Image (spheres, rainbow, N blue to C red):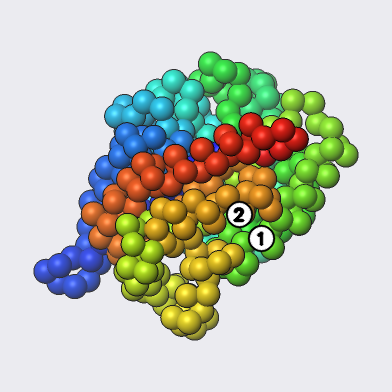
Amino acid sequence: MELGVYSFGDVLRDPATGGLGSTAQAQRNLLEAIRLADEVGLDYFGIGEHHTHEMPASAATVVLGAAASVTKNIILGSAVTVLSTDDPVRVYQQFATLDALSNGRAEITAGRGSSTESFPLFGHSLNDYDELYAEKLDLLMQINDADRITWQGRFRPALDDALVVPRPDKGKLPIWLATGGNPNSTVRAAIAGLPVSYAIIGGDAERFAPLAELYRRAVEQVKVPGADVRISVASPGFVGDDAQAAKDLWWTHYHEAFRALGEIRGFPAPQRAAYDREANGAGALFVGSPDEIADRILALHGAMGHDRHFFQMDLGQLPQKEFLKSIELLGTKVKPLVDAALAGKAGTPGATE
């Protein structure tokens, strides 16, 4: 199983003023984190598109392009690209360029975007939320299939035998379809022959197991030639040497992040009792010691059979040193435990992953 990290480019507090610090430094912090993730053997790092002072990761391919020059093995992707408000031609060109510079390590995760700040920023209406995504996903997939494209839609100028370059050496870019747990999106991924990425950010993580089963059943029914049948899970998470100390530390930053988000979206700040339920057992917050996190990943894998699990660690102004330490533990402690357990399971007669 692949393990990794995703980030929205969280901005740290300025110790001198107590307010939010430099959005420029947040980009440099991202690059430092990606380099470390590669060094400690993690498989994936994703940057999620956002356009706020708190989360200014607005140009993922630029940061990932810089990361391509200082990493060797780690997959570099978006988590997610808000495809509804972007131009699929430019998205494809940018990620194909990243793929060239990284020697085949680029991926796109296409989503609608749960945060909608990009809609007014780029002149799109939320009234077209579903139609924008459907049309642009269709165009992106057609571009991935052929270097010349003839296409016509509602939200973008038509293309007439247009050449879209560069092209990946391996032929196509991996494109994931992201969803927060929508059955229709699950089936859409299967019909399109795309891998599906589930954002599990609250509640019982194993409640997504029926969606994983739905995806596999739909894949089997539609039988798309060359389908990329994979499942990934994105979760909030943090790894510390001591389980309780990790939960206590991360609570402060989790609370701040969701308190601020709640003020914007109209929901109350989280309570510690609810956080403790989520950060233990089968909850969606993977916070604890390396042994605990490995056990919880394996338990969810037993329910969902997912192929990749990646974590958002840096939220609510988590200090960079704590972010980096968590990445290090995920790579050096958690991943070996997960790999060994799955290798042992695969070696057991009659066992399947």
Q: In the shown orientation, is residue 256 left or right of residue 137?
A: left
Which residue corresponds to the image point at 44% horizontal and 73% vertical from the top-left? 258
**131 or 299: nearer the viewer:** 299
Element at label 1: helix
Q: Residues within 10 Å of mark 1 (few under 14, many from 20)?
A: some
Q: Amino acid at mark 2?
A: Ala
Which quadrant holds residue 13? Answer: bottom left
Q: Which residue is mark 1?
A: 206
Left or right: 303 in relation to 6: right
Is residue 276 visible in the rendered image? The answer is yes
Q: Position of residue 121 (x, y in %)?
A: 46, 57
Measuring 18% from the left and 65% from the top, which residue is drawn there?
14
In this view, the residue farthest toward the front is 349
Q: Secondary structure at mark 2?
A: helix
Residue underneath mark 2: 299
The residue lying toward the viewer, choosing from 28 and 126, is 28
Q: Which quadrant of the view contains residue 92?
A: top right
